[in-house]
């Protein structure tokens, strides 16, 4: 991989360093979300037997263990809970730089790759959130980076160990990566076979066994006791999956309806944009797979060619596996954050396709589309909310208001079911022994204070409550 410093590499380092710093700020300052708090309270804060309980998709086992130790060492805080994600986010950004440099050298295509792989709002959210998706994404990309390095050199075989262990740990961080992990592994082995870098002994000892062991250590016991209900959440079809990713990528903040800086109505824009996205992605995947087959036939050795084969194969085999599982076992398609990997995979496939074909018009078109996408990502850039949980942004402020209001009195607090885990986390965070454990609000339960969403105005009237504080979509009442 070239090490020469150019204007594009300096710009890339500046962008990635800035995003790394922003992630630190977000991890330390943003209010905890329902997903983070519920996962911590249900798994990480409990005894070890809860970690190895029957498989639950909300229990990202590797992240549960890491957050368990980070909070025990550093205490209860948003930052300590998010620290494993923050560190893995830095590693993801480092992998983005290495992969982009390896495949595209330096210049406009390299800079476009760095921008679209790092600026997507949904990806950025999970580089600091206390969930396992960002950790899984970082591990997946490092496996891909080491695969490319091994294809260039064939030595040392330790690179096979590293890539295999990363893929196994990727599954331990989030089982939603199952299909891309299997698809990438199959494509990599196929590429080794075609290029005559294949050896049964080496592949089994250095790749298959380490990867399986790494995954089994964390997932063997939980999955052995899993039920079909654990795999029931998701999208009914591929269109819904794609629509969720498009909305969270281009309009993650409902209050920021901007299209390249122009105020728009996001739902209306998305209705127009979705057919374009579907046609564009279909053309991209067909073109990438067709070109990858040609590269395999000719045994192409280029870096961008290797990356194209790996990403196109991962996409094609993943989709085939998902479609088969859906038709055979009614497994849902992944949606929202569970489909996070599609974003960087498709971006890399498009960029490596342009580099492999080497046609100026295509490269120019890919750079232009990447630039427009990056510009749209920047219009949605913020450090106050996470895209899937905008309503949770004011929860910490609400807690601080309640602390002042209750003072040292013993109080009973009820909250909307989605907010209850967050308040109970902050009860631990601030050591509020005068707060009884927060319970979900019901019509029959009476409490001293209520934390509700603004949409629950009917409950306020029904219980004759007085609203004394508002923060965005949250209400405090007594």
Image (spheres, grey):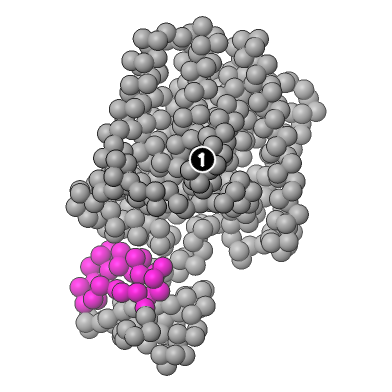
Q: Which residue is drawn at the image coordinates 54% and 27% (left, top)? A: 99
Instruction: Give percent across and percent down for residue 446.
Output: 31, 86
Figure check: 188 above or below 320: above
Residue at which label 1 appears: 328
**Residue nearer the viewer, 247 or 259:** 247
Q: Residue furthest bottom?
A: 464
The quadrant in which residue 350 appears is top right
The quadrant in which residue 46 appears is bottom left
What element does badge 1 sit on? helix
- The magenta-colored residue range is 415-441
Q: Which residue is drawn at the image coordinates 68% and 16% (left, top)? A: 294
The quadrant in which residue 10 appears is top right
Instruction: Give percent across and percent down for residue 249.
Output: 60, 50
Instruction: Give percent across and percent down for residue 97.
Output: 53, 31
Can residue 105 be seen by looking at this rendering?
Answer: no
**Residue nearer the viewer, 226 or 389:** 226
Q: Is residue 370 magenta?
A: no
Can residue 250 be seen by looking at this rendering?
Answer: yes
Q: Which residue is drawn at the image coordinates 40% and 42% (left, top)? A: 174
Q: Which residue is drawn at the image coordinates 51% and 51% (left, top)? A: 234
The answer to whether residue 321 is left or right of residue 116 is: left
Q: Residues within 10 Å of mark 1 (few under 14, many from 20)?
A: few
Q: Quadrant of the C terminus?
A: bottom left
């Amino acid at each position: 991989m070239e090490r020469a410093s150019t204007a594009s590499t300096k710009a890339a380092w500046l962008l990635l360093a800035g995003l790394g710093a922003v992630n630190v700020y977000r991890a330390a300052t943003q209010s905890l979300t329902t997903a983070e708090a519920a996962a911590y309270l249900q798994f990480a804060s409990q005894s070890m037997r809860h970690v190895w309980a029957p498989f639950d998709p909300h229990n990202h086992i590797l992240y549960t263990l890491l957050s368990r130790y980070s909070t025990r060492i550093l205490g209860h805080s948003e930052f300590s809970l998010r620290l494993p994600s923050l560190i893995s986010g830095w590693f993801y950004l480092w992998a983005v730089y290495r992969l982009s440099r390896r495949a595209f050298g330096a210049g406009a295509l390299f800079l476009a790759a760095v921008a679209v792989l790092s600026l997507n709002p949904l990806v950025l959210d999970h580089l600091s959130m206390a969930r396992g998706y960002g950790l899984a994404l970082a591990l997946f990309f490092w496996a891909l980076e080491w695969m490319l390095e091994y294809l260039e050199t064939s030595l040392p075989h330790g690179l096979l160990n590293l890539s295999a262990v990363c893929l196994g740990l990727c599954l331990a961080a989030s089982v939603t990566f199952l299909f891309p992990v299997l698809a990438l592994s199959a494509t990599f082995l196929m590429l080794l076979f075609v290029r005559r870098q294949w050896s049964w002994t080496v592949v089994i000892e250095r790749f298959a066994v380490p990867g399986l062991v790494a995954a089994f250590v964390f997932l063997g016991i939980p999955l052995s006791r899993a039920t079909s209900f654990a795999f029931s959440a998701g999208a009914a079809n591929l269109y819904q999956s794609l629509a969720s990713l498009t909305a969270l990528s281009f309009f993650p903040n409902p209050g920021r309806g901007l299209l390249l800086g122009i105020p728009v109505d996001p739902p209306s824009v998305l209705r127009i944009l979705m057919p374009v996205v579907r046609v564009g992605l279909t053309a991209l995947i067909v073109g990438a797979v067709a070109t990858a087959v040609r590269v395999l036939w000719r045994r192409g050795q280029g870096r961008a060619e290797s990356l194209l084969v790996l990403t196109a194969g991962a996409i094609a085999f993943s989709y085939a596996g998902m479609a088969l599982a859906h038709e055979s076992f009614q497994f849902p398609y992944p949606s929202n954050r569970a489909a996070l990997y599609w974003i960087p995979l498709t971006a890399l496939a498009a960029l490596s396709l342009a580099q492999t074909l080497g046609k100026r018009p295509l490269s120019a078109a890919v750079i232009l589309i990447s630039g427009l996408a990056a510009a749209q990502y920047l219009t949605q850039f913020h450090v106050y909310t996470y895209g899937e949980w905008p309503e949770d942004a004011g929860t910490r402020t609400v807690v601080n208001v309640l602390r002042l209001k209750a003072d040292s009195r013993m109080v009973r607090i009820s909250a909307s079911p989605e907010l209850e885990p967050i308040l109970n986390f902050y009860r631990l965070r601030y050591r509020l022994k005068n707060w009884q454990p927060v319970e979900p609000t019901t019509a029959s339960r009476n409490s001293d204070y209520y934390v509700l969403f603004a949409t629950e105005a009917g409950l306020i009237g029904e219980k004759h409550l007085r609203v004394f504080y508002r923060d965005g979509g949250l209400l405090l009442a007594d």
